[in-house]
Amino acid sequence: MSLFAIYAKPADVDEPQTLENEDVVLIRDRFSIIACLLTPIWCIWHRLWLELGAYVGVAFIMGFVAFFVGEAAAGWIGFAVAVLIGLEASSIRGYALSRKGYTYKGDVIAANAAEAEYRYVAGQLVQPSQKEEDTSGVKPTHVAPSPNLRISTMPLSNELPKGTVQ
């Protein structure tokens, strides 16, 4: 099971505001080996231009740091930066989507992206209420059960963050 962050961009003003017209992006929260080893290509692939510029700036600064502290120390610092980028790749994409107008909708735990999308849609759909005042008096023989799936926004632990007032 994986954790997926859901970001959605509402439809344009002239379109009806329905789930069908909403642009939804699912981001799996995991370590990205491509972002770690091939950061510039990963940034270009996901159109993260600001992040690419920041990476080039850090690489440029690392060149100067290597001159003063030695190439071995600069190599270890560069390795640490690469691992950090790999660990935070999903968060970096989420921040970039937030800048583009997407809103964070929540997290879904699912086995794959298709199941995560289903759980998101099932949690967003409003089930029509069945009227008890049926004039025919005949009840339908088969009623599909409504999915009882919700987006989990609960914290993973019950501990309060340090520094909070109780």
Image (cartoon, rainbow, N blue to C red):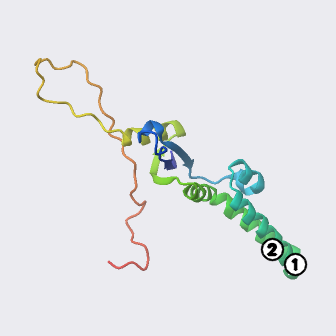
- In screen coordinates, is 139 left or right of 6? left
Indicate whether 18 appears above or below 41: above
Query: In terms of secondary structure, where does tag 2 sit?
Result: helix
Residue 78 in view, yes or no: yes
Q: Residue 38 versus residue 2: which sits nearer the camera?
A: 38
Q: Quadrant of the C terminus?
A: bottom left
Indicate whether 25 appears above or below 76: above
- In screen coordinates, is 165 left or right of 89? left
Q: Residue 162 versus residue 131: which sits nearer the camera?
A: 131
Disc 2 or 1, which lies upstream in sequence? 2
The percent coordinates of residue 68 (x first, y second) are: 87, 82
Indicate whether 47 appears above or below 120: below
**Residue with the most extreme bottom position:** 68
Residue 119 in view, yes or no: no
Q: Nearer the viewer, mark 2 or mark 1?
A: 2
Q: Residue 27 versus residue 57: which sits nearer the camera?
A: 57
- Label 2 neighbour load within 10 Å: few <14, some 14-19, many 20+: few
The percent coordinates of residue 126 (x first, y second) are: 31, 39
Identify the residue at image location x=51%, y=36%: 114
- In screen coordinates, is 12 left or right of 42? left
Provide the residue designation for mark 2.
61
Indicate whether 41 appears above or below 57: above
Callout 2 touching callout 1 (CB < 8 Å): no
Provide the residue designation for mark 1.
70
The percent coordinates of residue 78 (x first, y second) are: 78, 68
Q: Residue 10 versus residue 111: which sits nearer the camera?
A: 10
Q: Amino acid at mark 2?
A: Ile
- Spatial CA distance of label 2 from label 1 is 13 Å
Q: Amino acid at mark 1?
A: Gly
Identify the residue at image location x=11%, y=27%: 133
Identify the residue at image location x=20%, y=19%: 140
Query: In terms of secondary structure, where does tag 1 sit?
Result: loop
